[in-house]
Amino acid sequence: MDALDRKILAELQVDGRLSVTDLAARVGLTVSPAHRRVRDLEAAGAIVGYRAVVDPKVLGLGFEALVFVTMKQEDRATLLAFEESVTAIPNVLLAQRLFGDPDYLLRVRTTDLDAYARLEDDVLSALPGVQRLNSTLVMKSFVHDRPYPTDRG
């Protein structure tokens, strides 16, 4: 990946709807090489998709919690069952397995505290292998889906 590819990735992270013509102008290429480079970046897996970024409050999902999960069992079958179950919960926006304790971090969005309490009581606490859930409520978010740095910094 060279400097031009990095410029293309930087521009597309800010605005994935750029036309190839506008993208080419921004990175100093003509349309054909810009289009070829974007296709090559997609084929190489550097660009994995395009999506619209939606304000969760518009969808009525104004409540956010970070949930730390400690497992009582950490055998392969239990972890795979837990991860598969979490994947099926639409309100879980991010799920990460961590080193150390806790074992997992989940980012969850619901309509309000009552909806979150129901989700935790009825769904999250019943996931395979869960020993303990520790929730932290998000007071304020101020950095959202920041583009990845492309300068290797």
Image (cartoon, grey):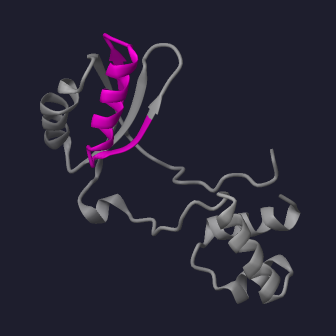
Residue 139 location (% of width, % of height): 37, 40
Q: Residue furthest top?
A: 72
The residue depicted at 30 percent of the width and 28 percent of the height is 81
Q: Is residue 74 magenta?
A: yes
Closest to the observer, 73 or 142: 73
The residue depicted at 26 percent of the width and 54 percent of the height is 61
Figure quadrant of the C terminus: top right
Closest to the observer, 23 or 82: 82
Q: Is residue 66 above or below residue 31?
A: above
The residue depicted at 69 percent of the width and 59 percent of the height is 44
Which span of residues is magenta-colored? 67-95
Q: How many marks?
A: 0
Left or right of 59 in this view: 15: right
Residue 69 visible in the current orientation: no
The part of the image, by quadrant, that contains residue 1 is: bottom right
Closest to the observer, 12 or 40: 40
The residue depicted at 69 percent of the width and 73 percent of the height is 39
Left or right of 114 in this view: 42: right
Residue 93 visible in the current orientation: yes
Q: Is residue 59 magenta?
A: no
Q: Is residue 142 above or below residue 103?
A: below
Q: Is residue 85 above or below residue 62?
A: above
Q: Is residue 98 above or below residue 31?
A: above
